[in-house]
Amino acid sequence: MIARVTLEIALRKEFDYFIPPELAEQVDVGSRVQVPFGSRKVLGCVTGLAEESAHAALKPILKVIGAQTLVTPKILKLARWIGEYYCCAPETALKSVLPEAVRHEQANWRERLHVRALPVPGELPKLPARQKEVWRILQERPELPLSELLVLAKTTAATVRRLEDRGLVTIAAEISERDPYAREHILPTQPLPLNPAQANALAAIITAMDVGKSEVQSLKSKVQSAPQAEVQGSKFEVQGSMFDVRCSMLDVQASAPTPPSSPSSPRSSTFLLHGVTGSGKTEVYLQAIAHVLEQGKGAIVLVPEISLTPQTVERFKARFSSGPLQTLVAVLHSHLSAGERHDEWHKIRQGRARIAIGARSAIFAPVEPLGLIVVDEEHEHSYKQEEAPRYHARDVAIVRGQMEGAVVVLGSATPSLESYYNCGKGKYTLLKLPERADDKKMPVVRIVDMRQNVRPGKAVSIFSPQLKEAIARRVEQKEQVILFLNRRGYSTSLQCPLCGYVAECPNCSVSLTYHRQEQKLCCHICAHVAPVPTVCPNEKCRNPAIRYAGVGTQKVEATLAKLFPQARTVRMDSDVLKRKEDYRRILGDFRVGKIDILVGTQMIAKGLHFPNVTLVGIIYADLALHQPDFRAGERTFQLLTQVAGRAGRGDIEGEVFVQAFTPFHPAIQFARRHDFEGFYEQEMEFREQLKYPPVGRIALLTLKGRNEEKVKFSADYLKHELDKAVGKTKDLVIMGPSPAPLVKAETYYRYQIMLRAQRMAALSQRLALLIQSLKLPEDVTLAVDIDPVDLA
Ligand code: ADP
Ligand code: ZN
């Protein structure tokens, strides 16, 4: 037998290897293998099997990694879809579906020596004192790791070996699982009685699961007959080789099957659960998961990395830690050690954990059979991977759901325009939870017009009198305050008022931020650090009166210390949080009331629940509005709504102050009224006019290189080739080339071409062909981003 192997090194090609008889049992499609390549040994994945090869003298597979096939046929199919849809090499797509901790060569379970007491045939022989002590412990715990036993018995391994010689115990290497949550005591929880809105939502989801099988089958046959999308059928056979299979080009947003749209009878198996913060979405997820477990299936829960806190994980573990539906909940998290990640992943692969919870890449968890995928905070941008493969986990979730007949539930208080639009089109079913589950009122949002605080010749104040007064009152009443500013550092720029010199990063086209605590100028793009000058660095100027402008979190903290010396203020941003324990510790201190005012960046905007927080202040709400990105308004709306959701989670009604220089901007006004629909209607008019997503689809091509002229030239050449290859296509618009908004980053110049199309799948296919024939200078690289979320 011959194995077709996709190697990890980027070659866009499969290679044939001969399967030695001793490995024949272990090699299958999806096996991870080590093979010779030239004089090296490289890792790869078996992506096909064949009877014979066109090549003579094949080299043998050297080694198989892992006891089970690591890439299941279903995940392999998904990886192929990703490679094609996101226009990346198959090996790049394949690499992303397995965690590094599982992929690498030495990946394995940890083995430890375990001691086990054996039954004593007759009378227990007389033992010396030390051995007797060991034996006594073994009567209480007949099996335990040797290392633990030695500590308990205060003895050495030699003593235990003697018991082994007497035939009283065995000592053997056994797998010892690393459980990152072993030390947490989790109290089981019971399902809560649902309120009517929750009950409706759950009923719709459960109905879809129950009709799941027949419904999905009929959807699939519909899809099959559509020219653009093939979900099943011979073309999808996983046994084939990567290159004779044209993968399904299921288009996530454009050509997904459109079931008849009737809001009362959910027909599609993708739901958008739109519920304000605290409306009880998580409880709906939990009960939906209970239902898939009853059906003998499993679930994947995606949450943004930043909300993957111990509290979140605990809610899921607590519900399924006991009772008839008891199962392990595996957590896939970048903060775990490599060993823990290996073990968590294999618990899923072996079917012992039927719930996988994790950030973006958990969408590839080998849960089987898969009944449900939950994507919480589906609007979050961190679901998009910003390096190849540039996939969007929410969109992959929808495709995976369709491939495997699983129900997909997207949840958010501020849905993405894409998802909401798809509800309008009848592709997803909209479910609403309009009120907080705990009967807490939504906080009152007050907009403060900061233009009234501007005085000629003076720096803009950080705190308006209104916010200052509110902080004073809340601190006085022993309530807690969160202040939010999405900019770290002390001052955002250093400028000379005489000659106009601005301290800029030598590697990036941004100004350096002044960090007062560290006494440094820092670049927030590349982390370049420069000393703080005492006079203007311009040779001809040397003005000693250089000025700092712009406000960062450090300055907010310092100003608070002056204004409210009695309050305990703590700052939380990525400068403070060098270690993961810091995050937990600060939040812990805040929870128990050791902190009065918490100042932070977006890190504190998400999903945190503190009952005693009654005031939330947003220092400059317009910061995100003035980004060169068509989603700036949407981001501002989401951010304000999410931050405001932190106030009034307890018994006292909450209050939010939004300070803004453009107080009448729709994003700010709609957020004030908690009016998502209003914002959506208004924003869609603008998207419609310009045919931006979700109305049209875009792809962003970025050329990068150290020599600006070469990058420019390559961009022109690419534009020329694009005109030839796809320019004539109806509905396709090619914009650019133009310098990227951030034209220089980390010493690389960047130029962009944006493509706008009605449908993406067909375009991806043609782009892939074009890229392969493109002849770019060696030091210029091209990045293709399909459905980009970051345009900078
Ligand atoms: P979301 O996920 O929408 O932010 P949660 O599920 O965290 O909301 O719910 C917010 C709070 O309301 C939690 O404390 C939760 O225990 C409580 N809650 C949710 N559903 C109910 C219910 N049906 N009855 C009573 N309390 C509920
Ligand atoms: Zn820089």
Image (spheres, grey):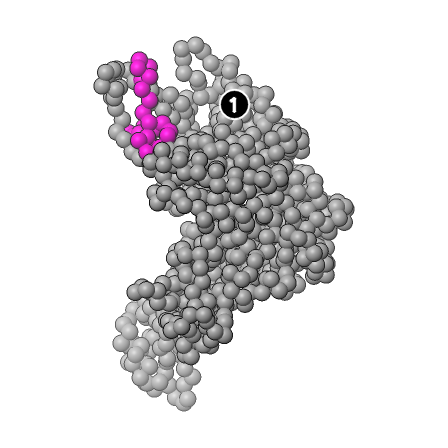
Which quarter of the figure has residue 706? top left
Q: Position of residue 169 (x, y in %)?
A: 37, 80
Residue occupying image coordinates x 61% and y 44%: 759
Say which of 622 and 442 sits in front.
Answer: 622
Residue holding disc 1: 659
Report the span colored magenta: 496-524
Residue closest to the far bottom? 122
The secondary structure making up most of the magenta span is: loop
Vertical placement of 536 versus 54: above or below? above
Q: Give the side of residue 365 with respect to residue 169, left or right.
A: right
Residue closest to the far top? 456
Residue occupying image coordinates x 40% and y 28%: 552
Q: Position of residue 139 (x, y in %)?
A: 41, 76
Q: Position of residue 381 (x, y in %)?
A: 52, 41
Residue occupying image coordinates x 46% and y 71%: 53
Q: Position of residue 61 (x, y in %)?
A: 39, 71
Which quarter of the figure has residue 662? top right
